[in-house]
Amino acid sequence: MDETKNDEIIDIDQRRKKILELLQQEGKVKVAELSKLFGISEVTIRNDLDEIEGQGLLQRVHGGAISTYKSYYNMTFHDRTETNKEEKRKIAVEAASIISDGDTIILGSGTTPLYVLRELKNHKNLIVITNSLSIAHEVGYNRNINIVVLLGGNINLEYQFTSGDDAIRQLSKYKADKLILSSDGVSSAFGITTYHHLEAELYRQMIARVDRTIIVADYTKIGRANFAHIESIEKIDCLVTNHNSPKDEIEAMKEKGVEVRLV
């Protein structure tokens, strides 16, 4: 772990965010090392870990904690929407700035594309195609969107998306300017991956049917590889993520031709 200057004051939210960053990078943390890193008592560190565990973002083990990234997918859709809320909002603002008036856009499922939709309130004459039930529902509150197309198919009520052959056949009728796609894993080596294998083929077809693919993923997703492969990193035009994402991964993606926007 990197050493923190003793005279540097870190508030509780910044400290817990740093703990999550270390978990994302190393997969585990130790109470004693964190206590030394932040210059605070082990009791305080244990309280931090207990609080973060309560949010489902780590698992306490003897002497420290390990990453429980999969626990994110055991949350309700609402709880996932609230997780890393500020990071997702910043990403959404930047991604929305890439969208032009009059665009036809595809929005994938997931919580970050939902945040992007909410930032499109000042755009005009948009057409939205999506496999997200939540996005299709919320589009009704945006009067600047002319047309919304909800791709039919098999419905996953728990994660609020449609998938399957019917959705793919319907998607084949359309061509779009831009795709806003959330990804469970974004890796320079393993590419774009998802926890939900049922969506992988649909996502591949989305990428094939747009002029520009924009991946929106908070820092916890960068450098990770998940269950189902979607596409190689070279197929992506732009990644919008947080400034505290792993620097080596960001540089490797840039070398492969991906535009990276850090917020």
Image (cartoon, grey):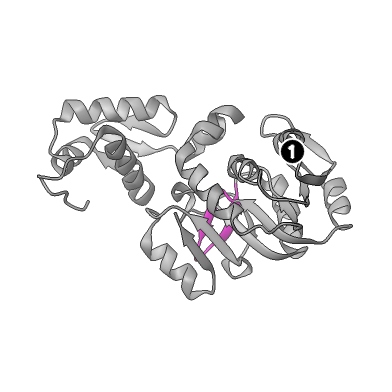
The picture quadrant where one finds residue 163 is: top right
**Amino acid type, label 1:** Val
State the residue in front, 228 or 143.
143
State the residue in front, 130 or 119.
119
Across and down, in percent, residue 131 comes to 76, 44
- The residues colored magenta run 183-194
Q: Residue at x 88, y 51 (%)?
A: 170
Asked if the stretch drawn in magenta spans residue 191, the answer is yes
How packed mark 1 is, by other alpha carbons closer than 10 Å (few <14, some 14-19, many 20 or more), is: many
Across and down, in percent, residue 199 comes to 71, 47
Q: Residue at x 44, y 52 (%)?
A: 242
Relative height, residue 7 to residue 174 (above, below): above
Q: Residue at x 43, y 64 (%)?
A: 250
Across and down, in percent, residue 11 comes to 24, 35
State the residue in front, 258 or 205.
258
Secondary structure found at label 1: helix
Task: Look at mark 1 in the image and give the residue it sits on.
Answer: 139
